[in-house]
Amino acid sequence: MRGVLRSSSLAAVLGRAARVSALRLSLAALALAGIVGSQRALPDASEQLADEAFVPSPAVAKLLAFGFDTVVADFYWLRAVQIVGSSRGPVGRNAVIGALIDVTTTLDPHVGHPYRFAAVWMTDDEAAVRKANELIRRGIEHHPEDWRGYFYLAFNHFFYLGEPIEASRALDRAITLEGAPQYLSRLAARLKSQSGGGLDAAAAFLGELVRQTADPDERAEYASALREIETERRARFLDAARAEYVRRHKRDIASVDELVSGGVLRVLPKDPFDSGWEISKETGEIVSKHVRYRYGVKIDPASRAMLEKFRAQAKQPKN
């Protein structure tokens, strides 16, 4: 008799669980059906994606998810991916991309890639970049040990927004995290040299890293970076001598040695890498023959052209 009762009770529990599961699945299907159905009324899916009016606020999306937040988050995430992958592409559509990623990461804040997706694709203008940074910071809140969030934040601050101080602060955090590539330390030092503290700040930063690390390879890397800073100090001294040469002789130098033969300097300062000095054919600057460029964050020609286009668009009046 007890066995029969236990079997009956178990069957009742299982039946109830099945009904609850079925109800939850029905609600999830209803939520997605409502979302998809509201958009099917439009004849052109690609055009409707461009209209931010078709992206609900995060609060409304969460309400309509009926507890199936991650399922609905995936739906909006795929919509963002669809925009970028469409023939029209993401240009001019950053507002809707930002709205979609906002909904996605509100419903499922523990995702990772959508935050970085925003950093890569939301670059139409300053407003888009700052919205991307807002989303990146949300990602950092939920993934505080992932160095990539800080890196993307630093990149946006420096490259698009021209804010080296904020970029430097973000990289300072990134380099302390597990998995961060070693080159970030040198990049952080270069940012510090452009963020108001100048070469002294960069040298102090690297000097502290030399003192903190016990790894001989890392110490050698940081020591080499410190020599680059000293090279830049001496190159700037030569810049001043070059300006004096132009003032005296009414022409520019053809070689660095003319600073001595022209009577401006008695002797050239030693290159910390023992390679000598030359005038760069690419930039016309005085550089070490070993380093071949001046100290600072380097931007390749293609990226510089993209940056100039971005900043030119930012100056255009808004309609």
Image: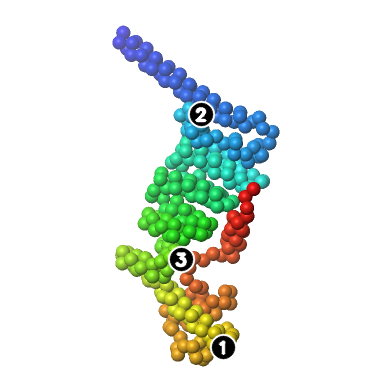
Q: Residue at x 59, y 31 (%)?
A: 36
Instruction: Identify the residue under disc 3.
Output: 194
The 10 Å Cα crowd at callout 1, few under 14, some 14 to 19, many 20 or more, is few
**Amino acid identity at mark 1:** His
Image x and y of residue 112, in percent: 46, 45
Q: Residue at x 39, y 55 (%)?
A: 173
Instruction: Identify the residue under disc 1.
Output: 249
Vertically, is 112 above or below 219? above
**Amino acid identity at mark 2:** Leu
Vertically, is 291 above or below 180? below
Q: Which mark is residue 64?
A: 2
Q: Nearer the viewer, mark 2 or mark 1?
A: 1
**Camera sees residue 154:** yes
Q: CA distance from mark 3 to mark 1?
A: 32 Å
Image x and y of residue 142, in percent: 41, 44
Single out the residue that lies furthest toward the right: 43
Image x and y of residue 223, in percent: 38, 71
